[in-house]
Image: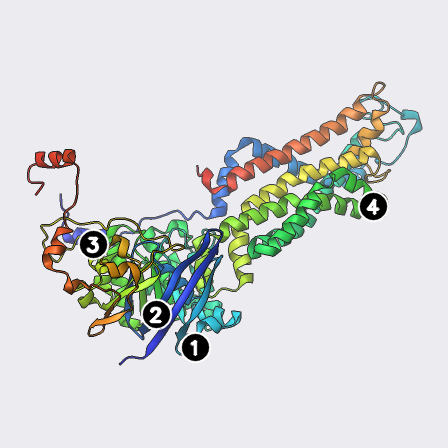
Amino acid sequence: MAQTLLQVEDLHTQFFTRRGVVRAVDGVSLHIDAGETLGVVGESGCGKTMTALSVLRLVPDPGRITSGRILFRGRDVTKMTDDEIRDFRGNDVAMIFQDPMTSLNPVTKIGSQIEEAMTAHKRFSPQEAGVRVIQLLKRVRVPAAERRVSDYPHQFSGGMRQRAMIAMGLANEPSLLIADEPTTALDVTVQAQIIDLLKQLNRELGTAMMLITHNMALVASLCERVVVMYAGRVVEEGPVERIFKSPQHPYTWSLLRSVPRVDELRKDRLVSIKGLPPDLSNAPPGCKFHPRCPFVIDRCKREEPELAEVAPNQVARCWVLMRNVPEEAAEVTKQVVISEEAAKKLQEIPGAGS
Amino acid sequence: MALPAATIEQLGQWEVPEQQIGLWSDALQRFRRNRLAIAGAAVVLLLVLIAFGSPLLVQLHLIADPLKQHVEFIEAAPGQNGYAFGADELGRDTLSRLLFGSRVSLAVGIFVQAIILPIGLAIGLTAGYFGGRIDNLLMRFTDIWYAFPDLLFVLVVVSVFGPSLLTIFGAIALVNWVGLARLVRGQVLSIKEKEFIEAARSSGSAPAKLILKHLLPNSLGPIIVTLTFGIPQAIFLEAVLSFLGVGIQPPTPTWGQMVFDGYENIYANPTSVVFPALAIGFTLLAFSFVGDGLRDALDPRMKR
C-alpha cells in the first residue's frame, strides 16, 4: 500500500456573495497516494477547480474554506501560516492552469519565469537554477531549449507554452502536480503530445498527479483512479476500469454516454444530460442530481444518500445504482427527441439517420 | 500528396530562422514610424541641449547675459542693436532669456514627474494589490485630494512656504499625482485577474515579487505615457504661477515670467509676449506628440 500523500477530509469551500452563500465545495473527501494519478471529473461549475484551489489555499475572494481538513503528508494545509503556505505552494504541490496563453507573464522571458519559481523557495542557487531551467525545458521536450529560454511568451506556440508551464510546475520537484484542464485550450494533436508528456513525467519522476478535466478520454488514458463530482460533492469514486465499465451513479453513467468512444463501435446516439447543474447557492433537497436523473425515485427527492461501497474500492452516492436499473429502462432514456423537420432532413442524407 | 516519412522527419529538424523581436524594440519600431512623434522628440532633444548649453553660449559671448540690464536699449525691437529677438522693459536680451527659460521649464517638467512617480506608484500599487478596505481608504483619500482646486492648493503651498524651486516642484507634484495613482490602481486591478498571477502565486511567489516582477512591468507602458503627458502639464502650471507672480522669482528668467513682464507693454512691444508664448506652445506640443507616439507604440493592441 503506497503512502498517502494528500488527504482531503470533509472540505467545505463557500463563497459569500450578495445573493447568498454558494457552496462550491460541499463536503468533499478524497485522497491521493504518492505517485498516483487521480482524475477529477464533472461538468463545469461542479467544484473541481475550487477543490484544487482550496488545496493550495488560493480560493479567490469572496470565497473561504469554511471547514474540513487538507492533510499533506500529515500537515494540515488549512492551518499553515502565510509563510508556510507560500513555501508549500510550488515546493510540495504545484499547479498548472487551463489556458497557457494567459498563464505566462507576457513581458518576462520564459526562462526567468521558470527560474522565479525556483528562487522563490531557495532550494537552488541562482546559478543552479539557470542550468536547471534548460534541463527542465529539455525534459518537457522544448526543442533548442538553450536558445528558447530567452524567448518571450508571445514567441511560443500554445503547446510550447503549456510545456513551459509544466516545466514551471516541475521546477521544485513537487510530489504532487495539480493539472486543471491542461489540454482544454489546445488543439487535438497538441493535446495528445501533452498527455503523453504528463504520462511520461509521472512514470519517470514519480510525481503524483491530480488531473481536473471534463474530458473522459483524457481520464481513461492517464488516470488510475477517478473521482466524479457533482454540485460540490463527490458522487462516485473508483478505479478507472470500474468507473468506465460499470459506473454505478446515474450521473457517471450519463457523463460516459455523452462522449464518443473510440474503443467500441456504437450504433446508438450520443445522449446529452438534460438540464443544467444546480445553482450552488440554492441546491435542490435530497440528492443533488435528482432533477436531472432519469431513474429518480421518491426517496431521492427527500433524502440525500451517503457514499456507500458498491464494489471493491468503488463507492457511489445513490439510492438506485445503475446495476439495479433494468436494461430496458436504460434503453428508453437513449431516445432523443428531435424535431420532425430535422428528422426529414436526416432521411435525405444517404447513409445517415437510423 | 503524402511526403515520404524520411522527409517529414527532416522537416521537423529544419529550424525556421526567426528574428528576435523583444517588446521594447518592437515598440521602438512603431514609435519611429510616427513622424509627429519623431519631430516632437527632436524638439525635446533640442530643448535639452539648449538647457545645458546656454551658460556655455554666454561664456563664449555668443549670446548676452540674460540678467544684464542695458538702460539705453529698453524695449529694443527685434534685430535692433544686435538684439535678434529684441530686449525687454529692463533692457535684457530676450533671446538669451528665452534660452535660459528652457532650464526652468524642463526642470519643472522632469522633477515634478520624478516626485509624482513614487507617490503614484506606492498608492496605486498598494490600493490595487491589497484591495478591500485598504483600497477603499486610499482611493477616498485620493478623491478628497482630487476635489481640491489645483491652482488654489499650489497658491496656498507657495505662499506658506515661499516661492523657492523646491516648494514649486513639490506643490505642482502634490496636485498631479492623483491621475497616476488612479491609473496604476486600475492597471493592477485588471492585471491581478490574469492567470499568470495565479500561476506565480501557485508556485509560491511572495507578494513583493508579484508586485515588482509581474504587476509593475505589465503596467509600465501606460505609466510612461501618463508621465510624458504630465510634463507639459507641469510646465504649463509653472508658467501660470510665474505669470501670477508666485512662480520662480525674478530675476531668474522663466517663460511664464517673461509673458507676465511683456504683457504690460503688449501694444508697444508685442514680441516680448509672443516669443515666450511660442516657446511654451512649441514645448507643450512637442511633449504631447511624444506622448501620443509612446501611447501608440507601447499599446500591444496597436500591432503594426
Task: Give residue A222's quadrant in the image.
Answer: bottom left
Callout 4: helix, strand or loop?
loop
> B250 or B113, which lies in front?
B113
Furthest residue in direction bottom, as rendered:
A1
Which amino acid type corresponds to the residue marked 3 in the rendered image?
Pro
Work out how far the residue at label 1 is from the one at label 4, CA to CA, in angstroms.
62 Å
Work out how far the residue at label 4 is from the one at label 3, CA to CA, in angstroms.
83 Å
Residue B287 appears in the rendering: yes
Q: Are marks 1 and 3 on the same chain?
A: yes
Callout 2: helix, strand or loop?
strand
Q: Which mark is residue A75?
A: 1
Residue under circle 4?
B164
Could you tell me which chain the residue with mark 1 belongs to?
Answer: A
Which amino acid type corresponds to the residue marked 2 in the rendered image?
Ser
> B85 or A229, which lies in front?
A229
Q: Residue at x 33, y 70 (%)?
A: A30
- Specify few, some or many for label 2: CA neighbours under 10 Å numbering under 14, 14-19, or 20 or more: some
- Estimate the x, y position of residue B260 in percent, counting from the top left: 82, 30
Q: Residue at x 15, y 33 (%)?
A: A341
Q: Which mark is residue A294?
A: 3
Residue A115 appears in the rendering: no
For marks 3 and 2, give the one nearer the viewer: 3
Which amino acid type corresponds to the residue marked 4 in the rendered image?
Ser
Chain-order first, disc 1 or disc 2: 2
Which amino acid type corresponds to the residue marked 1 in the rendered image?
Arg
Q: Are marks 1 and 2 on the same chain?
A: yes
Q: Residue at x 37, y 58 (%)?
A: A97
- Position of the C terminus of chain B, as image quadrant, is top left
